[in-house]
Image (tube, coloured by chain):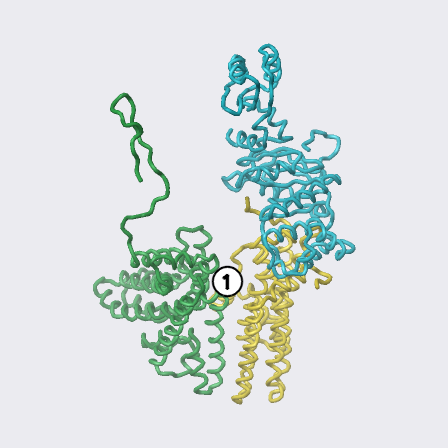
Amino acid sequence: MTSAPLGGRHGAGRGGSIYDLGYRVYEGPRLGRRAAVAALLRHTLRTAYGLGRSARSKIMPVGLVLLATLPALLAVGVIVLFAQFAQSDAAAGAADALSPVRYSTIFPFTAVLVFLFSASQAPELFGRDQLANTLPLYFSRAISRSDYAVARMLGLLIALLVLVLAPQLILFIGRVLVASDVMTGLADELPQVPTALLVGFIIALLVGSLAAAIAALTPRRSYATVAIVAVFLIPNVFAAILVSLDIGLFGQLAVLLSPADVLDGVNAFLFDSRADNITVRRARLEGWTYLVAAAIWTAASLAVLLRRYQRLAA
Amino acid sequence: MIHRMPVVAITLRSLLDRRRFWLMLLLAAVPVAITLLGRVLGDVTFSQIVFDRLVIQTVLPLIALVFGTGALGAELEDGTIVYLLAKPGRRFRIVLAKAAVAAGLTIALVLPATLLTGLIVATDAPDIVVPTVAYALAAVAGGTAYALGFLTLSSITSRALSIGLGYVLLWEGVLAGLLPGTQTFSIRQATLGLADALQGVDGETLDAGTSVTVLVVVILGSLALGSWRMSRYQLRGGD
Amino acid sequence: MTTEAPSQAAAISVEHVSRWYGNVVAVNDVSFSVGPGVTGLLGPNGAGKTTLLHMIAGLLAPSAGEVRVEGRPAWRDSEMYRHVGLVPERETVYPFLTGREFAIANARQQGLADPGAAAERAIALVELGDAADRRVGTYSKGMRQRIKMAAALVHEPPVLILDEPFNGMDPRQRLHMFELLRRMAEQGRTVLLSSHILEEVERMAESVLVIYAGRLAAAGDFRSIRRLMTDRPHVFHVRSTDDRRLASELLRLDCVFGVELDAKGLTVRTADLGQLTRHLPRIAKDTGISLRELRPTDDSLESVFAYLVGR
């Protein structure tokens, strides 16, 4: 209801309006489901890296990314130094060949960091809303329960992708720029890029969905953190022990039941390189079994995640 | 009913709550389960790895982390610490009581697990007895050091759980491999060194003297630092 | 009572105390002393009441100034807690303990000789006898406040500090609490309680400390404070046999700001109470008007508070 001017008379200084400032219903355009999901995705990403929050919440995620890029930075640094001092491509090439840091070995180096990141951030992303009881607020909007779970999951996935691919990116850029001719450098490095991207995606997906599923199961973030660490750590040791016993099938099963080892296997298989992990080497499984295992782990985790949010009381 | 030491009783009650305790019990049972499995499958030679990697390097620090950070952390976070602070007597007694509970619970879970693990294969491989006892004792000392260290950490920062995890996984895990010098500053290495020394084995770990020193320094230092911190603890926020 | 007596150590003495967190000043150069009886610390949320109470309770160090309880500095003096009982604002109490266990635990930590009996007495005082064996986690908000009270009273301290003690209590419980605290005060104890609810403080406290935005806006008996605020008009309601005539006479006085005439009588605003009370009877006598009713309309804590806060 809008105003009617006070007094109706012309002139003589009369006139003026009183406006109704009471509650009004929003009648304008609404952006709908896609925009809502996109907004949640953006928010999830920002929370994963502590953006828009105090400095304290940035320490872990940003610190872990920096640590993850360290090996790559060091490797590139070494190559550059060799190229400088040796003044010949052959020497730089040799340094490169000797370098333990390559696209295929980046993940084994940074695996722990990836697990730590997921253990530290996934509970934040999935547990907070449960603890603070803000889920009803989300579900009474255009977002459906599955939308919420998927949006959060996607956010975690992208956050992990950044962590996993940052070192690869640095390695790539370093090696291309160090090469005497950028074009040949690119030609040398590019073939590896799709593999690196694929492996990175699989890692982020598996770690992310597993961490998400665990984090979604409990509002208490510290439980989730320990549980996530445990699920990567304990089966790993378990598998190491069983494999060292050389009991064939059991050992192989144990390896496939250990997400950390599965990822190592995937990494080795897709890069067609020798696995860094003794357990994986000893298990002598066919490469594709790791891919299947990874797929099963991911699918199961996502199923648990979606089901949890379908059934959560909110 | 609350008995003689109210702080001990309250901490014990709060740590033994439902899920947390059962999860930790589950964790402690893992080495036993593996050994049982191995026994069934006929091989008993691997126990050393179980003790070394599984018990000392994984289960022990994780359990100590949960109990150590939980003993004080919860009260600091929700403000109920005021009921302990607004009482006569030195703050040291509060820290000591909580440390006793955290270490005690850790030991209560890990010690039987270690002994049981050895027991399962003892009949077939009697020479496992010495390592079992050695690792058990080392776990007691190491568990105490871990629990107290994490307890003190939780009195300093509210992110003690994540930082403690980072310490165990990164510092003691990854870094120890890369930079041998850090081994002296690692509770894990000290515990392993103690275990080796008690067995009379000369492993690649720290020698007996250094191991014991490290553990003692961590235990006493944690108590001292924790007491100092709690005696100056300021209750902020509110209003 | 707010006392200036330097001969005895006041129960609580706060001297030029400030507390800041970085750039934010929570308490700004506050000085007062508190003695036996009930004193109310009044202020809106965020004024610094809890910060001030935490400093008095020795749980927070002042950034500047001195806080003394019974003559000794409050910060880092754990023996003080034998004489001080604190009822904190935060609701959370160990949910897994029963009320009785919680009271006994507090009694034991105080080092009492017979913790069980002391706990029973305290529980009886707060009338939680029936619920004492239930877990605190099942308590209502008001019950939790009462068990916190019991825990603070278990060692019968001469000084009692309560932060928003009536939060969540229903009127009957509040009344009971009033009585309890009054009794404590009559026994000679020092009771300092904070609140942002004026009616409570008005009923309970003999003297009042008004704190706003970290500063002490006023201290003392609120009626005296009122009288000290000479630059704000007192408002009176007068009924007489000839209101209109009285109104025009009153408007002649310098000390009268405004007069409002309505069916119920006159509402007179004056800057100087003393002058008005001298003039009014004289006017009445000279004009032959009889005064039927004369009462102040704003001598409540509310108006005092509103004025101080608006300053």
Q: Is residue B42 left or right of residue A32?
A: right
Residue for point 47% across, 56% down: A132
Residue C215 lies, in percent from the top left, at 56, 34
Chain letter, colour yellow in render:
B
Which residue is at the front of the view, A196 or C251? Answer: C251
Residue A279 lies, in percent from the top left, at 44, 79
- Secondary structure of residue under mark 1: loop
Q: Is residue A118 left or right of residue A10?
A: right
Viewer can see residue B98: no
The C terminus of chain A, quarter of image: bottom left
The N terminus of chain A, quarter of image: top left
Residue for point 63% across, 70% down: B107
Q: Quadrant of residue C177?
A: top right
Colour representing chain A: green
The residue where tag 1 is placed is A220
Colour representing chain C: cyan
Residue for point 65% across, 44% down: C175
Asked if B67 appears above or below A31 in the picture, the reply is: below
Which amino acid does the dot numbered 1 rest on?
A: Arg
